Image (cartoon, grey):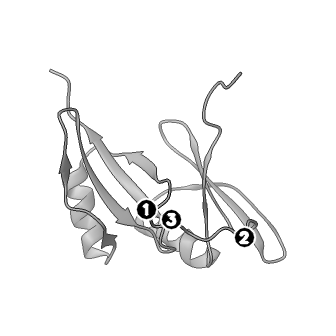
Amino acid sequence: MIEKVAFTMYPAKDVARARKFYGEVLGLKEGSVGNQGDGWWVEYDLPGGGCFALTNFTQDEPSANGGAIAFEVSDIDALCADLQSKGVTFKSDLIQSPVCRMRVISDSEGNSILLHQLHKKR
């Protein structure tokens, strides 16, 4: 029986570049990190729970059009302004829905990341 999502993983062609993007640009803190030669596995334990991982152990190519991770954010406008000042590539305009606001960006490897902010409940 499935209980929860254990982690979400993205492939990385250049692990050093990807670690810089997720650590310095997005501000995520590294958790478990391991390597075997040039093969890397890097985990980021997310503040509200869950785990995001980067790896070059697989031969998978980064996917701009495949699945995407969605990070919940507290202030999408401020975050987007900060990321724009850091030269991050935006793949969408702000998307409005009845329950949330979203915007899609690209990581350093070409993977899609969805920034997601729920509307405050009244």
Quadrant of the rendered image containing residue 107: bottom left
Q: How far from the left and from the top, in percent, is residue 22? A: 49, 64
Q: Which SS class for mark 2?
A: loop
Q: Which of 59/17 is in front?
A: 59
Q: Which of 45/117 is in front?
A: 117
Distance in Å between CA atoms under marks 1 and 3: 17 Å
The N terminus - image quarter = top right
Q: Which mark is residue 59?
A: 2
Q: How far from the left and from the top, in percent, is residue 2? A: 67, 26
The amino acid pointed to by label 2 is Gln
Residue position for label 3: 23
Q: Are marks 2 and 1 in contact (CB under 8 Å)?
A: no
Q: Which SS class for mark 1?
A: strand
Residue at 52% in and 66% down: 63
Residue position for label 1: 112
The C terminus - image quarter = top left
Residue at 65% in and 38% down: 6
Residue at 31% in and 78% down: 87
Q: Identify the mark nearer the N-term, 1 or 3.
A: 3
Quadrant of the rendered image containing residue 25: bottom left
**68 lies left or right of 86:** right
**55 lies left or right of 106:** right
Whether residue 109 is situated above or below residue 76 in the rendered picture: below
Residue at 78% in and 71% down: 39
Q: Which of 34/70 is in front?
A: 70
The amino acid pointed to by label 3 is Gly
Q: Which SS class for mark 3?
A: helix
Distance in Å between CA atoms under marks 2 and 1: 18 Å
